Structure formats: structure tokens, C-alpha cells
Image (cartoon, helix red, strand yellow):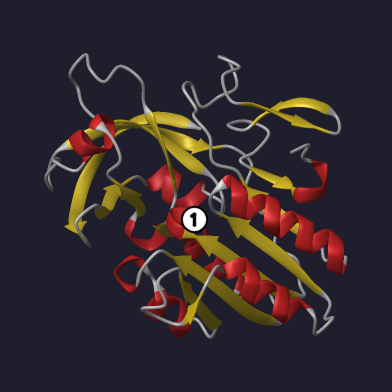
Amino acid sequence: MIQERARVIDHKKLTANYFLLTLSSAHISKNAQPGQFVNVKVSDDIAPLLRRPISIHQTDPKNNNFKLLYEVVGPGTKKLSEVKPGQEISVLGPLGTGFRIEKNIAILIAGGMGIAPLCFLIREASKQAKELHVFIGAKTKDLVLCEDGIKALGAKVYVTTEDGSKGKKGLPTAALDEFLKNNMPATIYACGPKAMLIAVSLLSEKYKVPCQISMETYMACGIGACKGCAVETNEGYKMVCKDGPVFNAEDIKW
């Protein structure tokens, strides 16, 4: 982990509120693991005071850069969306504990912006896993992200939308439930809203499939010092920013 001034290489607006930010950093691009994140100072101004934790979306070690896929949801990310190529922003990372890739069938499930860290994982898992099955859930077709890039890595993609505008109508957990009935040796990797993670955890228990989840919560310091992101586990309280954000689903007390 280091703190550095990372230069903005590229900054693209993907949809009304989704942005893809490319930053230069030899250290982060070469040392980051899928599931880790960076803590970004979105502005050199006093406000907003706290950094914003953003999952590492992709890395490009050859070119010493990495990408952040994020959604504008408040004043902090709104400020971040205004930075231009050539500017520098303060970044702390890579932070947290990431995913552990198993050499069996990989089943990945993302809800909404949960796809952001999973794209990095999919790329690395494609080098080790026997098969890749990716479930993407979104409210509507315009919010389905990264589908083509995931397919290019050889993954089988299952899209669900709540309004039925793309793929199967409904939630990705319903599609996952049907898939797990095939009773195959696999590992589930999940990232998304808390309600989805609870549902995935119950499915992993039901079908006796190991599951790793990436938890989303408010994180201030990013290094476990402020104790603001505690989550209850079977071994007591753990810090999402330091002990996670990736945990074994069975270890979390919901």
C-alpha cells in the first residue's frame, strides 16, 4: 500500500451516472489483486474531507495504469466525475483483502455496480478456472455493464433485468438458483447490494457451494484505524476495509 499522486490518463462517461477512470500507477497496477480497492481523494479542496473507496476495475501492468468504474451517487463522486486527463489525484492503495481464485468452475454474480470489481476477477479467473459463468443483474438494459468484455474472456453470461428490457426478467439470484441445481463442483464469487449477498449466501448454503462475497459499506480511513466499517462475523467483529471487503459468506452474521 502506498499513497501517491496518480495522473488521469483517460476519463469516459459511459451512461448518465457511470464513469470509467484510468489512472497511472506502476505500484497499484502491478500489485493489486481482484477484490481490492483504492481510497481516492476526489479533490484537493477541503471538502469533501473524506476519501472515497472505489473497487479496482481492471489493471494494465504493462502500461502502468489501472481503471476505476464508478457511479455518481453524491457530492464526492460528482466532484470526481469532473476531473480531466492530465490532472493528478491522490490515491491510497491497493487496500483490503481480495478474492481467492479456486481452480474449479467459477460462478460470478453481480448486482448493479457489483460488476466493477468482478471484471478484474473474471480476467484472472479465466487463466485458472475450468469454466466461467457470470450472472449480471441490473434494473434496466441501459445499466447492464461490461457484458461484451466478459464474453470476450470466454465466459458464459446470464443477464437479468428487473424490468425485463434485457435478458430474463427478474433478479440474478433467481437465475443462479436454477443454475445451481446442476450440482457441479464450483465456487461462487459475489458482489452487489446487501440483500443480494444475503440471498446468494443462502443459496450457497442450500447447494453446499463455497461462496466468497465482496461487501459494500461506508469506509472512511480504508486501513482499519477508524473502526467505522465493522461487520459481525463468527469470529467477532471484522473491518470490511482491512479484513475484507471479501469474506467467506458462511462467516458473516447477517
The residue sitting at the front extreme is 163
Nearest the eye: 249 or 35:
249
- Say which of 10 and 237 sits in front: 237
Whether residue 69 sits left or right of residue 84 in the image: it is right
Q: Residues within 10 Å of mark 1 (few under 14, many from 20)?
A: many
Residue drawn at the location 19% of the way across and 43% of the way down: 81
Residue 59 position, x and y percent, is: 42, 58
| Number of on-image labels | 1
Indicate whether 43 appears above or below 215.
above
What is the secondary structure assignment of the residue under circle 1? helix
- Using the image as rendered, state which of residue 60 and residue 205 is in the foreground: 205
Give the residue displayed 71% in from the left and 80% down from the top.
179
Query: Above or below — where is 73 with respect to 122?
Result: above
Q: Quick check: 86 left or right of 105? A: left
Evaluate whether residue 100 shows in this view.
Answer: no
Q: Give how far across and how far down residue 201 sits, in percent.
A: 74, 55
Q: Identify the residue at image location x=45%, y=82%.
A: 167
Q: 234 left or right of 125?
A: right
Q: Is residue 143 visible?
A: yes
Q: Identify which amino acid the numbered label 1 is placed on.
A: Gly
- Can you identify the residue that label 1 sits on? 114
On-image quarter of the C terminus: top right
**Residue drawn where x is 26% and y is 51% of the image:** 21
On the image, the x and y values in percent for residue 100 come to 70, 56
